[in-house]
Amino acid sequence: MRRALLAITGLAAGTTALVVLKGSPGVGQAAHEPPAVAAPSGGATPPAGTATLGAKPRARATTRTPSARATTARSTSAPRATTAAPRATTRRVTGPVVENEYGNVQVQIVVSGTRIVDAVALELPQETAQSDRRSEQVDGRYSGPSGQVVQRQSAEVDTVSGATATSESYRRSLQAAIDRAR
């Protein structure tokens, strides 16, 4: 009689601990596992997958895939929309340094998927005040998320008047960056 009383008390305590530690049924693995039962008297071996008081838990006879747990957890939440497009990867692609008589020009583009979303001049001629002014004009017209490079999605940009050499060097570095991005 004491054994039965201890077994029932132990079962109740074990079940309570299991519920407290695992959370509510339906969220995790606890909803799929049978409750622990006490060992029958007379030394009989309990069925596979059941626990006995004071004994180590036995391995379950059936195996469960990791996705079964994830599927159960997802089924309690709202269904996911499957119409969303995959996220485009954003990467930076740098063109080569192109020399001209006023200095070096180097362009970097930011590509999201197959679209150019930004262009940046990493290097422009700045040897004199005049070359610096012209470089600013080229940079202002071509670079940035609203510049001609992003608008036209190509290296076919208008030449900046008075900055032909810098414009051409920008175009060459830009075209090489676009070719590398493909």
Image: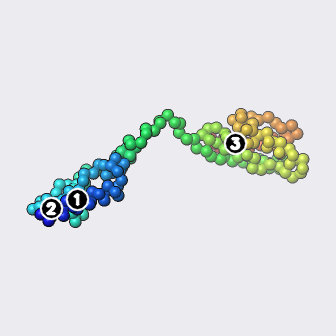
Q: Quadrant of the C terminus?
A: top right
Q: Which mark is residue 112?
A: none
**Up-down relation of residue 174 to residue 63 (above or below):** above
Residue 46 coordinates in the image, percent (x, y): 16, 57
Q: Left or right: where does residue 16 sit relative to residue 148?
A: left
Q: Residue at x 43, y 38 (%)?
A: 79
Q: Quadrant of the N terminus?
A: bottom left
Q: Amino acid at mark 2?
A: Ala
Position of residue 175 in the picture relative to residue 64 (left or right): right
Give the number of the disc on residue 118. Answer: 3
Q: Amino acid at mark 3?
A: Asp
Residue carrying label 1 = 11
Give the residue at mark 2.
Answer: 4
Give the distance between the C-alpha atoms of the residues marked 2 and 3, in whole angstroms: 76 Å
Q: Amino acid at mark 1?
A: Leu
Is residue 168 something one can see in this rendering?
A: no
Q: Position of residue 25 (x, y in %)?
A: 33, 49
Mark closest to the chain's N terminus, 2 or 1: 2
Quick one: SS at disc 3?
Answer: strand
**Residue drawn 47% across and 36% down?**
81
| Sequence-first disc among 2 and 3 | 2
Q: Is residue 50 left or right of residue 95?
A: left
Question: How far apart in space, not on screen, are marks 1 and 3 (Cα)?
Answer: 65 Å
